Amino acid sequence: MKNIIKKFGLLTLATSFIFSCTTVDFGDENVNPNSPTNMKTDALLTNAITAIPGIVSSPSSNYYTQGMSDITYTTYSRYDRYQWSYDGFYTGPLTDLKEILDLNTNNAADVIAYGDNNNQMAIAHILQVYMYHHMTDRWGAIPYTEALKGAENIAPVFDQQKDVYSALFVQLDTAIGLINNSAVQVQGDIMFNGDMNSWKRFANTLKMTMALRMSDVDPSNAQTKFLEAVSGGVLASTSQNVHYPYLDAVAHENPWKGAFRTRNDFAPSKKFVDYLTANSDPRLAKMADGSKNSGGVTYAGMPYGEEDPSINGADIASITSAIISDGKQHGGFLYTYAQVCLAMSEAAILGWAVTGDAQTWYELGIKASMDQWGVSSADATTYIASVPAVGSTVENVAMQKWVALWLQGYEGWAEWRRLDFPNDISAPAAALSGTGIPVRQGYGANTVSNNSANYKDAVSKQGPDTQDQKLWWDTK
Amino acid sequence: MKTNLFNFLTLSFMIMFQWSVAQKSVSGTISDDAGVPLPGATVQVVGTSNGVTTDFDGIYSITVSEGDVLSVSYVGFITQTLTVGASASINVQLSSDNTLEEVVVTALGISRDKKSIGYSQQTVDGEVLSTAKETDLNIALTGKVAGVQMIGGSSSTFDNGFLRLRGEDNVLYVVDGIKVYSMTDINTDNVESISVLKGAAATALYGADAQSGVIVITSKKAKAGESFFTIDHSTTMTNVSILPNYQNEYGGGYYQSFDTFTYNSAIDGIELKDMTGDLLPYYAADESWGPRLDGTAVRHWDSWIPGHPDFGKQRGWNANPNNVKDFYNTGVESSTSISFNTGGENYGMRTSARFVEQTLPYPGTERDQLDAGINQNLKISDKLSAYSSLNIQLRKTINFPEQGYGGLGANFNQWFQRQLDMNRLRDNYNYNGGIYSWNRNSARNPVPLYWDAPHFSINDNLNTQNKEVFFGNLGINYEITADISANVEVRRRSNTYRSDSRTGWGGVNTESYNESRSNYNENEFVANVNYDKNFGDFDVNALLGYQVTQTSSTSLSSGSVGGLTIPGFYSVASSKDRPSYSSTRANSKQISTYSTVSVGYKSMLYLDASYRFDWGSTANPDDNRIETFGLSGSFLFDKLINVNGISFAKLRAGYSEAPVFPGVYQTSKVYGTGTAHGTKPRFTVPNTLANPFLTGGTRSEFEVGTDFNFLNNRLGFELTYFDRVDKDLPIAIPVPGSTGYSGLSINSGESSTAGLEFTLNATPVQNDDFRWDVSLNLATLKKTTDKLYEGIDVRVLDYMSWYSLQLQERVGEEWGTFVGRKPKMTADGTPIYTATGRTVYEGDQVLGNILPDFTGGFSTSFGYKNWSLDAGIDFQKGGMFYSVSNMFAYYSGMHEDTVGNNDKGNPKRDDVSAGGGVHVVGVTEAGAPVDLYAAASSHFYTNYFGNHPNWLYDASYVKLRTVRIGYDFPKSTLENTKFSDINISLIGNNLLLLYSNIPEGGLDPSEIEGSGSLASSYRSQEGGQLPPSRTIGLNISLKF
């Protein structure tokens, strides 16, 4: 009996001891061995830059100006989709760039190994502006001031496009101001390899582009910013063209290459091919290959937006094989010298205080575009001689820009919306949504359901969330 | 001599006389308290071996002497004794012993009397598994237990599907106390019984792991005094049973005319010179809107293969209605198992092995599996005994069939050319070293555009998997005193998977090779002390335990990128670009103590309480303890009410609270990585914000139920109601992407579930030769989302690609709402179209709910002498799923609804100008009438693609799942043989879909595979269902 009591007593003691423990120390058991925690801002920068292919080489963005067309599945070119999501920009590159900014501010000493702190921040700011600019030109009002705050603000308010533009100019100027010639080279910069002069040129070209967008809605401010950018230093030759650094490796190849690997869905449109043919434009042979069934001889473009095309892909011209098989030199331009020259030409026509006259810049722009596509100097000169003078309206500049920006889908679309040339394209009869060629993209379903109060507020100020709602700078 | 004989005879006579006077024959009827005779009751003279049993009418006759004491007994009844008096007729009425002595297995393997349990528990006998030789535990349990539903698992793949218990998915499977990693690790031939513990009160002793329910499996063990072998063999054949309703009038293409070949000397070889004018089908098209199948001579895809005897030859453009059926073979499964059992007073040992070889109707597939196990127990001394078990499984699988969108199921049903000859596809896809597909780019370009030849997919794109499992335990029991015993046990399980997969040269996708290896281990140490004592009317049982569990997993995978450099040689080392590589490790540890006390009063009232503490490494280190408790009671009131006919009545109720630990590594912040750009690495801030204060949430559940048995257990039912509330669930709250994150893990979710379960068992007929049992179970539940996060009312659970169809959780509504777009209609139901007859949609509409109204099963068995017939049916009413297969069958002109005549009597597919087209009648948005004929190919696209309500099908079904007809050789035949038992049975599985509600046909709603080839546990969409199939075979089992 005594034994039993003794045993019970011990048991009770042991039990109460165990039950009184509120925590147990497990040591390192829950430290995640699978992912890194060290603050490598170079790796963050590289990752942010790898989001750019989606901006500059997106096949679907080329439908709007009808430079490209669908061969079989024409639903994409007939605007079957009107809801597009911007979430990927925020959760991906923009957060990574914010992380770079935070780390360079709060942990400057830890990350100086990856480059001068100010230069790192300058690059991060420039890339953020580039991406926000791209987004606002697609959707209009977007969260900017209240964005990227994580748990602190789970319902960011939308800034109207006008305010976004103002804020972006401020951020861009800050960035340009931070650029210095420190010897501590920025690591992880796959665009310019740490060359801050290139970043300065890029930033000013970006500023110039943003300024030109405001040409109709706020001409005086547009002129001011434009001239600031020019004097700050923009692209000065085709060798300074900014092209995304694609690789052979599949993970980093040109999306056009991947799109053509197993499918043959896209082709230059009939309108584009006819226009180039009518003007004997030597760029046609460089931009496209003739149809397979003709042995590469005939150039026939694909009619745009037909419901049941019933045309065999082998009878149509296709994008040049240089892009389909390689894509490292073409099909991924961010900004080109041709764009810059044509912008200067337009500025001169508008009466802005630029040096040089409209015609000179016009011819330089066409020549730059020819160089970019590998046309010989002789052919370029012949073509330029045959083209009428630029004139006093923006029409000719706009048409040349339409050709020069071929395959720079989103940029070409923004410029077409602003300049309104070519003025003889319209939504296809078999369009699946909207009433005309889209002039913006609708907000993604996630935004509608997850940020609905702010979404409704933004829409009430901007206009209905359809693709026919003109944006702030698209006044005409 | 004469005198002796006379004396002897007289003496004998007197003795006999004495005898006969003393012994008399007594007879009578033994019956129960209702007067029903009891056959087979025992009437015995106490203290002797003089005993008889009653016959079929309950009548006995026994030779006794006056004054003898007779004892009358029968199983389930209270034994009566009486003294033989003068009467020669003694009838006895026995009263039933209401206490059902059924013993069931509960949490932690503790055996309890079923009557004493306060929560809902159901036992399934291991016999059920051998009824249809089902090697899959989940399929064997389907329809047998109320509240347990089997989800998915295509019958023509190796996919086992999974079980949902009271709406929850992460069911825990425990075999002899060892938590197995996967249900497929269990050898169904070794299962003695299955105990299903559904509610939180039942599983409280297991702690957090068992929140969603536990299936406790007890394996067969040798019993004392027996020694026997068993050999079992079965062979079954499987054939596809349901195929979609294809059209066979038009072949492949996008338009109804043929292209013509024109020889071009600049690019064509001389051998093509005379082919100008040959009619060309549109090879690159993967739809069937092409020309009519009228026998026209055309150049089929395989007439362009250089060097092939059919090169350049034309053949008729004809229908091949059975082409898809011809692709599938008859699958064969052959399974052989042997076991040896021997047991004595102090020991028991059972060892078993099973070998299974299986091929599926899907060609190129094979699975070989070996399961071996041994368990033993040994009584070392009076107080000490030891036991151990070891189970091993080795399994090799070649070619898991790919389900879902992009697999062959999708290819044949959604994107195909109806005229293709499957035999020619098989014979000609690989000729002279070249790979040829029906989907070539053009006459001149053999590179396939979208689809490989189907036989290329199964012969050249191979995958294999090797699985090795072992799990086992070793323990000792020590009786400290008569009332107290202790137990110490160690357990281990280890699962290893090695897989590789490859894509061959010459197909649509770049050649590649991938390898992976993963390993999942768990080690556990357990120590228990048990106390068992009766105090007068009170029955006390207490348990105190301590447990340490260490779980670890590692996985490694690597694959080629950009192609392989050496033709014919598959290895990651020969990858063109830098190969992809990933490795993941996860470790966690848990320490627990638990205790349970049960008290019984007068075998009528029982109370059960259990409490458990867990400390886990995955929680916040400053707060890593959780407590689980459960309380239940049962009250047997049949003795109180004493109604004739009610042999058992019980009322039970229980309550439990069970928190959960967060997932491993969820509380620490890290960066994600991406494929390096050249030599530059990439980091990214993850899209979900890590929350260092994350807990796992808490579940509290209340349950009440009642059990009744009537007419000596000839009829019984169980009814249970449960109400469960989940609070503080960690969920990735969807936040707008503009915050920089797509999700934040926050403890804020709340949901509640309430349900009702009903089980009915009856034996309508029972006599000597014939017995008929039926059992029915039904369950219904409603799960509601109560709260997500402040300001967030909707959370998307699953995105389906077709025009933003979503499965959502909405606050205040039943969980699992389908939201998508709906064709617009006027107030009186007239459809709204554009002026050209295209459907106009309105988005963001609620379209239905994924959870069923009720589920259940019905099983019946007949026994007539040595014959038996068993059948099992399971069913579901309500629920929904989206069919991608039928949607694209319309889109691509594959379905029979896309052919036939319109209301003018002309073929739908004729040109509208020629009287064809589909009649479209309605109004425009502005109210103008629409009355026109739309071209068939665009009509079936614009008015049906992404028309969500049309393709959200009712998931109701009734299925005859198993039937078994068996014959037991009579004992008399076997007497002179070595065998003690021989049984031959005819078995059938997945036999017949008795009811489904799918207007366009071709699908089995009980086999939805989820999205793509990943099994999404929501099973909201069928992306490319492989055809369901039916299995029939023969089984023979011998015991000797």
Image (tube, coloured by chain):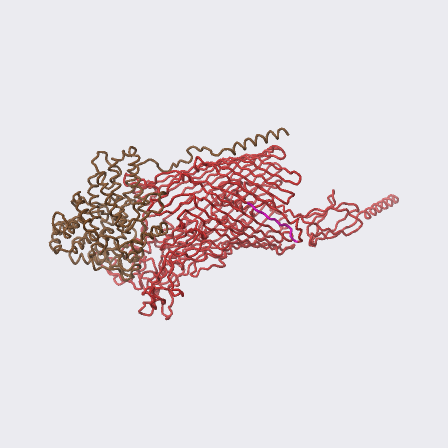
- Of residues B645 and B223, the one drawn nearer to the viewer in this rendering: B645
* Extreme residue in the bottom direction: B904
Q: Tell me where the magenta segment starts and ends, as one range.
A: B645-654
Q: Which chain is red?
A: B
Q: Does any portion of residue B935 appear in the rendered image?
A: no
From the image, which quarter does the C terminus of chain B lie in? top right
- Of residues B109 and A376, the one drawn nearer to the viewer in this rendering: B109
Task: Give coordinates of residue B1023: x percent, y percent.
Answer: 40, 54
The reply to whether the magenta stretch includes residue B35 is no
Task: Give coordinates of residue A165: x percent, y percent.
Answer: 25, 48
How many labels, in total?
A: 0
Q: Splitting the image into 4 quarters, where does residue B1005 fall?
A: bottom left
* Extreme residue in the right direction: B3
Task: Give coordinates of residue B857: x percent, y percent.
Answer: 53, 54
Q: Does any portion of residue A321 appear in the rendered image?
A: yes
- Of residues B629 and B95, the one drawn nearer to the viewer in this rendering: B629
Q: Is residue B1001 above or below residue B432?
A: below
Q: Splitting the image into 4 quarters, where does residue A108 fall?
A: top left
What kind of secondary structure does the magenta stretch mostly adopt?
Answer: strand
What shade does chain A have?
brown
Along the horizontal axis of the image, is B160 left or right of B762? left
Task: Give coordinates of residue A381: x percent, y percent.
Answer: 11, 51
The reply to whether the magenta stretch includes residue B647 is yes
Q: Is residue B310 above or below residue B84?
A: below
Along the horizontal axis of the image, is B865 left or right of B30? left
From the image, which quarter does the N terminus of chain B lie in? top right
